[in-house]
Image (cartoon, helix red, strand yellow):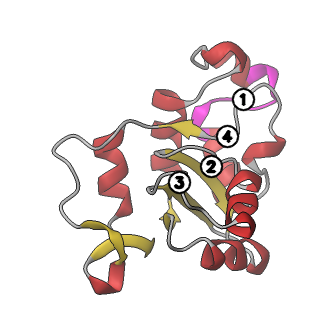
Amino acid sequence: MVKSLLVVRLRGTVNVRKPVKRILEELHLSKRFRATIIPDTPDYKGMLIAAKDHVAWCHVKASFISKLIKKRGRKEGWKPLSLKEIKEMNFKSFSDLAKSLEKGEVVLKEVKKIKPFFALSPPKGGFKRSTRRMYAQGGVLGENPELISIVEKMM
């Protein structure tokens, strides 16, 4: 079973090398505090490892994906998603879309009428760890199992 990854860009846009900038644009993470959901495949893992100094990622469950889509999912014109638009995309509910995203059956950038990223705000209460270091070194970047709690403060 293919799991999904939640990827959040935590570093800014200044002094980013061109290959990394291209990878971040392909992931639709053009600005700071943008998040996306991608399948956990070797291709995407390679992209994340190349951009590890700018993003954090972790495995994500369908319940959290559903909550993220309800709160921060947007369609064209930055309007919030409603159940009507979800049903037009051939999904029964937000949780049905979240389950298919978690299993890797659907990729967020291929779903029509929905933006392929989520715009988040800075976390309430700030970061408790450094945003300039990897998770193993006491920071938040890279593969971070605590990322879900950080993103909940950002919603």
For mark 4, does the 10 Å Cα neighbourhood hold few (<14), some (14 to 19), or many (20 or more) residues?
many
Residue 55 image position (x, y, % from top left): 51, 63
Disc 3 designates what residue?
14
- Read off the magenta span: 87-95
Measured in 3D between alpha carbons, the distance from the residue under mark 2 to the one under mark 1, in whole angstroms, is 15 Å
Q: How many marks?
A: 4
Left or right of 54? Residue 110 is right
Image quadrant holding the C terminus, namely top left
**Mark nearer the viewer, 2 or 1:** 2
Q: Which of the two residues, 81 or 143, is positioned nearer the viewer here?
A: 143
Disc 2 designates what residue?
29
Disc 4 designates what residue?
97
Q: What amino acid is found at the position of numbered circle 2 in the picture?
A: Leu
Q: Earlier in the sequence, mark 3 or mark 2?
A: 3
Q: Residue at x 55, y 51 (%)?
A: 13
Image quadrant holding the N terminus, namely bottom right
